Amino acid sequence: MKSDDGAAAAAAAKNPFARSVRRHSSRASARFVLAAAITAGVALGLAACSSKPAVPDWQMNAHASANKAIEAYLSGNTRVELLEWDRARGEVSRTGRPDLLARLELMRCAAMVASLVPGPCERFEALRADAAPAERAYADYLAGRLDPTQAPLLPEPQRKVAASPDIAALAAMPDPLSRLVAAGVLLQGARISPEAMAIAVDTASGQGWRRPLMAWLVLQAQRAEAVGDSAASAALKRRILILEQGTPRR
């Protein structure tokens, strides 16, 4: 076992929800894991080594199910998404720790913000009293009501975007889901620009994430119509039609 694997296992054993995640790909490049920039410690840890304490089964299972749930949600597979979220919640519930469950719910809400799905993060709010300050700050950030004094609790990439709707800061975010979440937050705060919307569209398209791509394309088409750009509107509607025609039947 390599030393860096052992270090990862030790970190995971100390923190059942590691505050970083890793991108992984097996059958398709679209498979991903949430990056640390998304949730300030929301993601579940995953590492093990025979020379170190084994990672508990609940943690391994919850990590796998949460990632599958988010991938299914972004891809538009509602049936799999709901099934995997239930599995993830069941595994985390084995710990009896509401703070860990709150982190899990923030993962789901972040994906919803990335897909322009409005509404409060109700499952998190029910657990807010037991959530850590960083998680409470991130929930407020997702809702577009972050107190500026709480901005230092956000991950660094999100702090930059929260402070200023800078296109360069948005484009520089390495994780695609973090980028989409930040764009969604900018939209909620009425600080979104056409350039930022284009970044969101390109990001969702590049990952093959049908749900957020549809939402951002529809928004772009609406904006194009509002300014009388019929050519752009027509082009966007053609892209939307391709998405609709390619939606698998379930």
Image (spheres, helix red, strand yellow):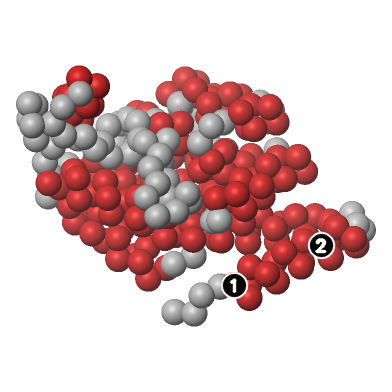
Please tell me whether mark 1 sits on a helix, a strand or a loop: helix
Relative to 188, residue 27 above or below: below
Which amino acid type is marked by label 2? Ala
Distance CA(mark 1)–CA(mark 2)? 17 Å
Q: Which residue is mark 1?
A: 246
Task: Return the x and y of residue 21 as percentages of the image width and height.
Answer: 35, 35
Residue 11's disc is none
Look at the image and tell me whether residue 46 can be seen.
Answer: yes
The C terminus: image quadrant:
bottom left
Residue for point 72% across, 45% down: 198
Q: Are marks 1 and 2 in contact (CB under 8 Å)?
A: no
In depth, the one of 60 and 226 nearer the eye is 60
Residue 235's disc is 2
Task: Return the x and y of residue 17 as percentages of the image width and height.
Answer: 25, 36
Which amino acid type is marked by label 1? Gly
Can you tell which quarter of the image residue 237 is in?
A: bottom right
Can you tell which quarter of the image residue 166 is in?
A: top right
Look at the image and tell me whether residue 187 can be seen.
Answer: no
For the residue carrying disc 2, how many other residues have a C-alpha within 10 Å: few (<14), some (14-19), or many (20+)? few
Relative to 81, residue 89 above or below: above
Q: Earlier in the sequence, mark 1 or mark 2?
A: 2
Relative to 210, residue 187 above or below: above
Task: Return the x and y of residue 117 as percentages of the image width and height.
Answer: 54, 57
- Whether residue 222 sits left or right of residue 149 in the image: it is right
Please tell me whether mark 2 sits on a helix, a strand or a loop: helix
Task: Return the x and y of residue 163 as percentages of the image width and height.
Answer: 61, 24
The N terminus: image quadrant:
top left
Residue for point 47% across, 20% down: 152
For the residue carrying disc 1, how many other residues have a C-alpha within 10 Å: few (<14), some (14-19), or many (20+)? few
